[in-house]
Amino acid sequence: MPRAHYVTLADLPPSLLGPVFGRVQQLSAVMPATLGAQGSFVGINNVVSQSVPHFHAHVVPRTKGDGLRGFFWPRTRYASDQEAEDYAARLRAALHAPAP
């Protein structure tokens, strides 16, 4: 996501649309194989339900029967900071791997 501060998608300059959504596309493409999911869900809040007042996109791994209803998915905590870092490291590695 952009390091410069933009509150909503409407605030994002047109010059950043391609780079930001290109990265969202890349992440949604590697997520299933990297995390053992069947697909992904991409969502953006604008003001309402935006708990962090900074533009960002949610890219959520999906599997059939995972409980996602509309924009609400069952949120769970990582067992530890190490587990969270492991997921992040796996996704970073997949994003930096050469294309097949």
Image (spheres, helix red, strand yellow):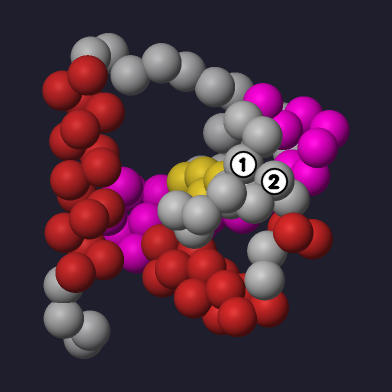
Q: Nearer the viewer, residue 33 or 78?
A: 78
Instruction: Of the two numbered discs 1 and 2 on the same chain, state the one appearing first in sequence.
Output: 2
Q: Residues within 10 Å of mark 1 (few under 14, many from 20)?
A: many
- The location of residue 24, given as percent across then percent down, is 50, 64
Q: What amino acid is labelled 1 in the image?
A: His
Considering the numbered disc 2 on the image, is that residue within a helix, a strand or a loop? loop
Residue under label 2, please give it.
7
- Depth check: give the residue in front, 31 or 48: 48
Q: CA distance from mark 1 to mark 2?
A: 4 Å
Residue in view at x 16 percent, y 59 percent: 93
Residue in the image at 21% along x and 25% along y: 83
Residue 5 image point, x, y percent? 57, 49
- Whether residue 32 is visible, yes or no, is no
Which residue is under mark 1?
54
Q: What range of the chain is rendered magenta?
A: 28-51
Identify which amino acid the numbered label 2 is placed on.
Answer: Val
Q: Is 41 colored magenta in this rendering?
A: yes
Residue situated in front as seen by the camera: 19 or 74: 19
In x, y percent, where is residue 64? 57, 44
User: Which numbered marker is on residue 79?
Assistant: none
x 41%, y 49%: residue: 37
Q: Residue 33: x and y, percent? A: 31, 59
Kindly state the secondary structure of the residue where label 1 is placed.
loop
Kindly check if marks 1 and 2 are in contact, taking CB atoms under 8 A apart as contact.
yes
Give the left or right position of residue 84, taking residue 11 as reference.
Answer: left
Answer with left or right where residue 12 lies relative to residue 36.
Answer: right
